[in-house]
Amino acid sequence: MRKEEDKVAERLLKCYGRNCLITEQKHLKSQLTSYHSKNYCKDCLKIIKYGDEERSRVYMCVKTLFHIPYPTPLMKKQIRNFYEVEGIAYQDMIDTLLLISTKNSVTLDTGRGLGLIPYFLEEMKNEKNPKRSKSDVRVSKVTHLNLRKQDLQSREYINSKMYSFEEGES
Ligand SMILES: [Zn+2]
């Protein structure tokens, strides 16, 4: 009997998803899928893939706004840090970057990377908050009209890309 049990235990493998690592839940090999050379169960794979897709949307936003072919290693490190340490959602990073890009007084600088995000996070959240007073909304609309054409185009580009991305998701 013990040999039978061993055989079953042998076939149980680790899932590298956060939830399963915490609960030390093991799975049958047939229930796991290899993704970037690590095994994940169905639930964890969904979470991992969603995170990767969200992050790649941030990358795309960075590429467009900074006019660079790929985020620099510093930027990738910052994005990871914002998400894992500071708990900033990927969508909030995107919205904050878009807000920063509308500011004539601020220049997006590849050398500095994404260091400005935490400084404008609150402002972005206030902008999104519907409880704000109407006069504030009007002011921000005027600001948006001052967008340079190029900014506007890149915003439209990002939004259209994101829209098609979301459509693909569902
Ligand atoms: Zn799992």
Image (cartoon, rainbow, N blue to C red):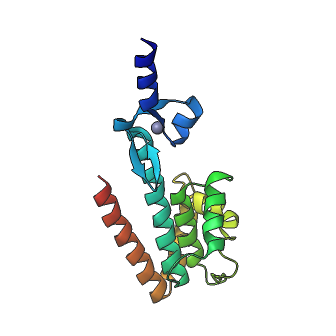
Q: Is residue 160 visible?
A: yes
17 vs 136: above or below = above
22 vs 3: above or below = below
Question: Residue 96 or 32: which is nearer the viewer?
Answer: 32
49 vs 162: above or below = above
The image position of residue 96, as x and y in percent, is 58, 66
Question: Residue 139 or 67: which is nearer the viewer?
Answer: 67
* Residue at the image position 65 percent from the left and 84 percent from the top: 107
* Residue at the image position 56 percent from the left and 30 percent from the top: 24
- Viewport quadrant of the N terminus: top left
Number of labels in the image equals 0
- In the image, taking residue 127 as reference, residue 32 lies left or right, namely left
- In the image, taking residue 167 as reference, residue 22 lies left or right, namely right
* Residue at the image position 29 percent from the left and 59 percent from the top: 168
The image position of residue 58, as x and y in percent, is 51, 66
Extreme residue toward the top, this view:
1
